[in-house]
Image (cartoon, rainbow, N blue to C red):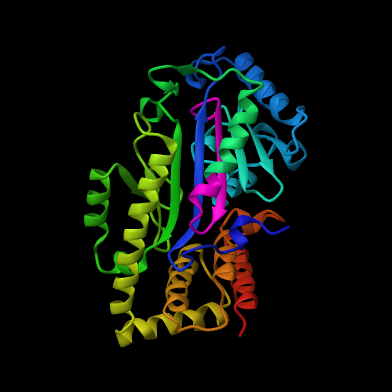
Amino acid sequence: MTRWYEKSGKEADVVVSTRVRLARNLQEYPFPVKMNDGQRKKVEEAVKTALLDGNSAIAKDFRFVSMEDISQNEAVSLVERHLVSPEFISEARGRGLLLTQDETVSIMINEEDHLRIQVLHEGLDLEEAYETVDRIDTLLNERLHFAFDDELGYLTQCPTNLGTGMRASLMLHLPALQESGAMGRVSASLSKLGLAIRGIYGEGTQPVGALYQLSNQVTLGLSEKAAIDNLKSIAEQLIGQERAARENLVKNLEIQDGICRSVGVLRNARMLSSNEFMRLISNVRMGVAANLIKNISYDTINSLIVQVQPATIMLAKKMTPAERDALRAKIVSERLAS
């Protein structure tokens, strides 16, 4: 089964993936920060029952994962695959995850809110991702009582999520804008437009391999469609800026040399740290976009970026850091073999 991170979609040279997430809470229970262990379990069971015991066609696609039953390494791998937030794995008690087989849909139970329903698609695909998350939201709403206020909309633990409770985001590869030192200016401009640009795993994280998350900030007084249209419109401008910056950047012979050397190292290295891999694969991705590199696809690059992360690469067995770096180099070399 092909997972979302093993494919590429629209505007693949810049947009790696699309995510749309809804925050929901059950009106019968306090927000997670105020819940006791018994209430956490009841919320978990209510959500599981609503989805898995229903007659819906999608129920069979989901499996349940109790965070208390998995190892720390397995939990970190979920973050690396963008299926849960870093905050979600900080505490396992009373937390569960509903996950589809292809990993396009994940539902975090008892994170900051009772439910965080998330849909991931490859490339720029905001409308379809929203349609999917909206269908699941509607299905769950038939069986659960979501906390909703006629004036404020959906009630959430953090006031910044009030209203639609929706966060839509795009994972963008912006090496040229980063190299030119423009990201500070870009971030300030986006903030004025009600958008935020963050690191690879969202809030509180740093960009790695020139990968950034662009997301909407405003959830109150704005419909889901308006928020998505606004995000898409500004993303398209950012895509245009990145392409223009790349066109100038790759005219530089030193940049071209760096890109081609990156391919050589990735194909021949015997050991690769995670940071070195991310730096080099970012160069290769830009080289593919600039037609400097042939025979390497975005699909291959996107899947490697997830599959050789530190925790994910160790899902099969525990390894020393040196063994892990050697295995990473071997996997990358084989996948990029000319």
Q: Mark yes or no: residue 20 visible.
A: yes
* 259 relative to 85, above or below: below
In the image, residue 112 lies in the stretch drawn in magenta: yes
Residue 262 coordinates in the image, percent (x, y) = 46, 79
Q: Seen in the image, is 29 located left or right of residue 66?
A: left
In the picture, which quadrant includes the C terminus? bottom right
Examine the rendered structure and indicate whether residue 135 appears above or below residue 25.
below
Q: Which residues are magenta?
A: 111-129
Residue shown at 72%/47% (left/top)? 101
Name which quarter of the figure residue 161 lies in: top left
In the figure, 37 relative to 121: above or below? above
Q: Give the quadrant of the N terminus.
A: bottom right
Q: Mark yes or no: residue 94 visible.
A: no
Image quadrant where residue 182 sits: bottom left
User: Could you tell me residue 193's position as x and y percent?
Assistant: 26, 45
Left or right placement of residue 276 versus residue 9 in this view: left
Depth check, front residue: 255 or 50: 50
- Rendered location of residue 68, percent (x, y): 66, 32
Q: Position of residue 7 (x, y in %)?
A: 60, 63
122 left or right, relative to 290 = right
What residue is drawn where x is 55% and y is 40%? 118
Q: Residue at x 67, y 41 (%)?
A: 99
Question: Is residue 81 in the magenta section?
Answer: no
Going by the picture, which residue comes out furthest to the top? 28
- Residue 330 drawn above or below residue 160: below
